[in-house]
Amino acid sequence: MSVPFLDLHSLYEEIKDEVRPEFDEILDSCYYVLGPKVAAFEEAFAAIAGTKHCVAVASGTAAVHMMIWASDLEPGSGIILPPNTFTASAEGIVLSGHVPIFVDVDKGSYNLSPSKVEQFLKECESGGRLLDPRSGAVIRGILAVDLYGQPADMAAFEEIADRHGLLLFEDACQAHDASRDGRPAGSFGTAAAFSFYPGKNMGAFGEGGAVTTNSDDLARILRMLRDHGSREKYFYDLIGHNYRMSAFQGAVLGIKCGHITRWNDQRRQAAAKYNELLSGFPLELPSEDPGVRHVYHLYAMHTPDRDKLREFLGERGVASGLHYPYPLHTQPAYSYLGGAKGDYPNAEYNSSRNITLPMFPGLTETQQIEVVNAIGEFFSS
């Protein structure tokens, strides 16, 4: 029996009777961009994220870019982030005219390490400023990433950011409906970015993203920037972009707001079952920090035999993934930052050893047993 990495069709079957009338309404109204469907989604998702505002945009990449861009940091500011993340995290910094500064992650969670950030900031103190020793950029922000669906230790970063006078951003693109110590992902710091790419826990039928924030001023600027810098049609207070969400995506996401908690509960149940079934194998299984609602966007385990295991699983019809096999500081696009292999050992360990197993709402125990049996066959051989 083959096991897919992700089953989007079954999720569509659950909601198609809700979606089709919404699409008919949009087609009849001809209101295709922003509008009431997007506004209704923004209200519903702000409640999930525990924030005053949700500003819907065209993609998760746009969301990361916009939240940093709208924060009006001095050009060329340094922003700390982890190396083992999708390139959009760093792209948002660069597109905003700033400098990505990598700091290593904690072993186990593979999220940005508060202790390593604190130590790095101490080493950067110079004349009352925080200067990155490589780029010379003045450090003015931190961007923590909620990797694989587990929120980073955002409360610790809030304390660090407050003490050092830094802005704090959250890349929550993999953490819809996750939480830490009762606080939802998306509710920490200055602002948070979410992606609604189809494969995410709460995916659109195409591209989509959002920025959540409690700042009235920031939300007002975000709404202008996504629409060419306009506060009303043909009045431009800012130079912006076309980062508007389509009404169709707003409608789909508004419906999915009512299902996300149940779907994430199914992911958590599947993760617990994997943990039980895989406990006897020489694998490093995912860890869940105390007080965290991990929503398992990805079930990432670690083994030095990652590549051979992945090939073996593929031959037996079991899909798997790599997230992310090459940390950003080793990528050609970021070579100008001066990073090199060996600089961030925990991030590099994660990238060289992680393998992600099938994970989606509705994943059956029979499918999981098929996955685990294939893994057992690999190790026994």
Image (spheres, rainbow, N blue to C red):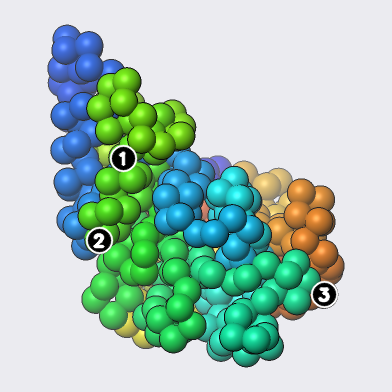
Q: Element type at marker 3?
A: loop
Q: Element type at marker 2?
A: loop
Say if residue 153 shows up in the picture: no
Q: Which mark is residue 214?
A: 2
From the viewer's perspective, is 268 left or right of 118? left
- Eyeballing the image, is 137 above or below 107? above
Q: Where does residue 264 sit, x and y in percent of width and height?
A: 31, 58
Mark 1 = which residue?
A: 223
Front-lying residue, 52 or 145: 52
- Measure the alpha-carbon separation of dots 3 and 1: 41 Å
Amino acid type at image mark 1: Arg
Amino acid type at image mark 2: Asn
Residue in view at x 61 percent, y 50 percent: 97
Q: Residues within 10 Å of mark 1 (few under 14, many from 20)?
A: many
Amino acid type at image mark 3: Gly
From the viewer's perspective, is 221 left or right of 167? left
Q: Which mark is residue 342?
A: 3
- Measure the alpha-carbon separation of dots 2 and 1: 14 Å
- Measure the alpha-carbon separation of dots 3 and 2: 39 Å
